[in-house]
């Protein structure tokens, strides 16, 4: 879709400063991820988006290259790296215009098994995940009636001999159709019999290959962006007793303990998105000529881009601080939450600015801007909404009264 002649514009000839100040930690990993991503261009993602299809080849390449196994310890076939390596990978995927939403859960779901799984479970499952023989992409927590109030979930598991029998429903279980395993949270003791409402929940590893058609069914949900999300139904699904992760009744704590990693990884993706969008907006603003000059010469165009840049850099610093504390063995609950909120705000702002800078062309599929605009909007709501982060900060950091 032609709209301008860049060769007539001297701004585009100026050597572009490294204004994005791209991170250099895990440099080799970042370079390798960029190289891999360069093979999956806008055309690839647009075609999938149109069909709401899963990026099977992209995820297979990431797996083959070992990127999705970086958090798996070496003894189980992974590379045993820290969370900052996973964060660098997720940031670079988004920075390259690709979409890690298709596989990011494998990085953070892994922690539940790593931290709370038995030696038998780890040695059985993790090498297969690291090798790419099985996919660990589905995470079933949210339910239609309970929403953010996780303790109120209604899916139940009751013990029957050497099995657990599961009944209930999950919603927004992303990638369920493209995963072999699901980490599932279900109630094993009725809430009335528990000292605390968050007690009595347990985590299971569900082998979906065996379960599909035998008590497990999946229904895709069409959404504003291509996210492979679904509703999952359990009807007397039998899961071997050995698939209970950790201790019965402690599942809520286990899920909570993985939240910091999840927040930090999503925040890194948002920083990557923001960088891609800001660069795209900056380039277009320098290239597009209206009224005889580049639109980027107008402060009305410059300032929103500059502000989005400043907010992205601030969010990036918070992501780094959360990572620093996480890798030092601290509990960076506040920093992880703030990083997720600030980075999601930064990417949302950058998306808005990018589409505005592009004028009408921002709405054309071919520019990839509207697709990124839709994709990054999700992170205002999932995996935790901005309101709930603010509640967390008010209650746990500022010691204000609990609001719910
Ligand atoms: C595309 C997509 C993919 C997802 N993938 C997964 C997945 O793989 N696995 C999974 O388990 N879940 C997944 N989710 C679910 C996601 O985590 C939830 O949608 C999110 O946590 C919000 O829950 P809810 O939709 O039930 O909203 P609700 O809890 O119904 O909340 C609705 C609105 O009210 C606000 N709100 C609620 N309570 C309060 C309060 N006390 N104070 C102030 N505001 C409040 C919320 O912030 C929100 O804006 C996904 C969601 C989407 C849309």
Image (tube, grey):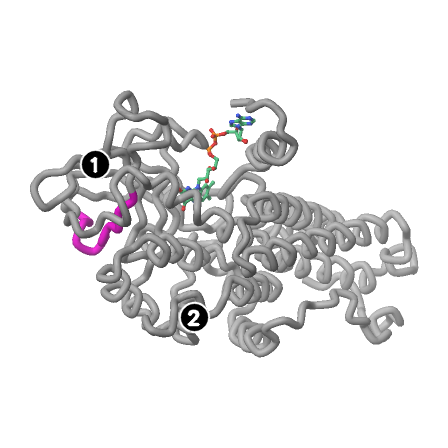
Q: Mark 1 and ligand 1: say if the CB distance to the nearest ligand atom is below 8 Å.
A: no
- Residue occupying the point 53% across, 67% down: 85
Camera-side residue: 148 or 192? 192
Q: Nearer the viewer, residue 68 or 111?
A: 111
Examine the structure image and report whether residue 204 is included in the region drawn in magenta.
Answer: yes
Q: Is residue 175 above or below residue 95?
A: above
**Residue 367: horizontal and vertical position, in percent?**
64, 59
User: Is residue 42 visible to the viewer in this orientation of the structure?
Assistant: no
The answer to the question of whether label 1 and label 2 lie on touching residues, with beta carbons closer than 8 A, is: no
Residue 278, labelled with which disc? none
Q: Which residue is mark 2?
A: 80
Whether residue 50 is in magenta: the answer is: no
> Considering the image in quadrants, where does the N terminus appear?
bottom right
Stretch of the chain drawn in magenta? 203-213
Q: Which type of secondary structure does the marked residue at label 2 adopt?
A: loop
152 relative to 92 in the view: left or right: left
Residue at image mark 1: 157
Q: Position of residue 291 (x, y in %)?
A: 91, 55
- Where is residue 338 drawn, in percent x and y? 63, 44
Quadrant hosting residue 170: top left
Compared to 389, does 270 lie above or below? below
Label 2 Cα neighbours within 10 Å, binned few <14 / some 14-19 / many ≥20: some
Q: Secondary structure at mark 1?
A: strand
């Amino acid at each position: 879709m032609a709209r301008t002649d860049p060769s007539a514009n001297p701004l585009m000839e100026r050597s572009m400063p490294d204004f994005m100040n791209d991170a250099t930690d895990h440099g080799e990993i970042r370079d390798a991820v960029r190289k891999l991503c360069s093979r999956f261009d806008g055309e690839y993602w647009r075609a999938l988006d149109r069909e709401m299809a899963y990026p099977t080849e992209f995820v297979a390449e990431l797996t083959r290259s070992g990127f999705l196994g970086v958090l798996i310890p070496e003894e189980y076939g992974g590379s045993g790296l820290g969370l900052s390596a996973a964060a660098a990978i997720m940031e670079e995927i988004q920075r390259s215009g690709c979409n890690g939403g298709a596989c990011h859960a494998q990085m953070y779901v892994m922690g539940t098994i790593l931290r709370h799984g038995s030696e038998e479970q780890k040695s059985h499952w993790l090498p297969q995940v690291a090798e790419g023989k099985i996919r660990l992409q589905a995470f079933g927590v949210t339910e239609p009636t309970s929403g953010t109030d996780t303790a109120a979930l209604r899916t139940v598991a009751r013990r029957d001999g050497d099995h657990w029998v599961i009944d209930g429903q999950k919603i927004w279980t992303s990638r369920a159709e493209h995963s072999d395993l699901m980490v599932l949270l279900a109630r094993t003791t009725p809430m009335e019999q528990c000292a605390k409402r968050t007690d009595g929940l347990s985590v299971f590893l569900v082998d979906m290959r065996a379960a599909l058609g035998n008590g497990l069914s999946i229904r895709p949900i069409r959404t504003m962006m291509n996210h492979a999300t679904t509703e999952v139904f359990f009807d007397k699904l039998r899961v071997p007793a050995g698939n209970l992760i950790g201790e019965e009744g402690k599942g809520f704590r286990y899920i909570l303990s993985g939240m910091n990693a999840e927040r930090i990884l999503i925040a890194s993706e948002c920083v990557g998105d923001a960088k891609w969008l800001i660069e795209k907006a900056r380039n277009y603003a320098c290239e597009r000529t209206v009224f005889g000059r580049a639109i980027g010469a107008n402060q009305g165009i410059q300032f929103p881009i500059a502000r989005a840049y400043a907010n992205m850099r601030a969010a990036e610093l918070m992501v780094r601080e959360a990572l620093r504390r996480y890798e030092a063995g601290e509990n960076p609950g506040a920093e992880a939450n703030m990083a997720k909120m600030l980075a999601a705000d930064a990417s949302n702002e950058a998306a808005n600015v990018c589409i505005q800078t592009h004028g009408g062309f921002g709405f054309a599929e071919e520019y990839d801007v509207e697709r990124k605009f839709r994709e990054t909007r999700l992170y205002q709501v999932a995996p935790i909404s901005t309101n709930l982060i603010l509640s967390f900060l008010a209650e746990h950091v500022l010691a204000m009264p609990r609001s719910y």
